[in-house]
Amino acid sequence: MKQADLKKQLMAQVDSNDQLKVEKVERYLDLVRIYRKLNTAISKFGPMIEVENGSQKFLKPNPAISEKIKLSAAITRLGKDLNLQDSEMTLTDMDDEYDESDLT
């Protein structure tokens, strides 16, 4: 999804006259932009990177992965703070989903 499309969708869900909400949408978009750059870095360098320390060479996990996880959590928290609605998420009654025979 393009950044402009995402902004349009987010702004449709918040009061555009509430400057605090508009600022939070901008922060949300900034975090998404960084998240996408981390994705690019992980794709380019892979999940493991080679590190040289003097004469030593060793592999270690790409630090972009842990940053991506932290950023994902921040995006989720900010989305909840903005009361954003997830169009793919639906709430159902637990009684409709399972019955006692599912446990055996």
Image: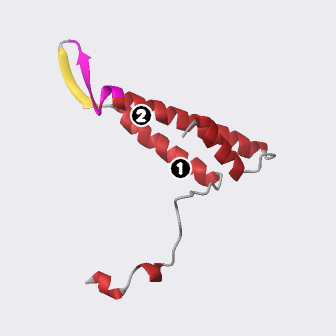
Residue farthest along the bottom direction in this orientation:
100
The residue stretch that appears in magenta: 44-54
Q: Quadrant of the N terminus?
A: top right
Q: Residue 39 carries which label?
A: 2
Kindly identify the residue that appears in the image at 24 percent across and 16 percent down.
Answer: 53
Circle 1/circle 2 CB separation < 8 Å: no
Distance between the alpha carbons at the discs numbered 1 and 2: 17 Å
Query: Nearer the viewer's eye, disc 1 or disc 2?
Result: 2
For the C terminus, the quadrant is bottom left
**Residue 98: percent from left, percent from top:** 39, 81
Q: Nearer the viewer, residue 78 or 100?
A: 100
What residue do we see at 56% from left, 57% from top? 86
The kind of residue tagged 1 is Thr
Residue at 79%, 47% in the rendered image: 18
**Which residue is at a point 35% across and 31% down the rendered structure image?**
43
> Would residue 19 be found to the left or right of residue 4 on screen?
right
In the shown orientation, is residue 3 left or right of residue 35?
right
Task: Measuring from the top left, give residue 88's x and y in whole percent.
Answer: 52, 59
Q: Answer whether residue 37 is magenta in the image.
A: no
Mark 1 residue element = helix
For disc 1, the marked residue is 76
Q: Decide: few, some or many residues near mark 1? Use Cα within 10 Å; few <14, some 14-19, many ≥20.
A: some
**In the displayed structure, does residue 23 sit left or right of residue 59?**
right
Task: Tell me: residue 24, above or below residue 102.
Answer: above
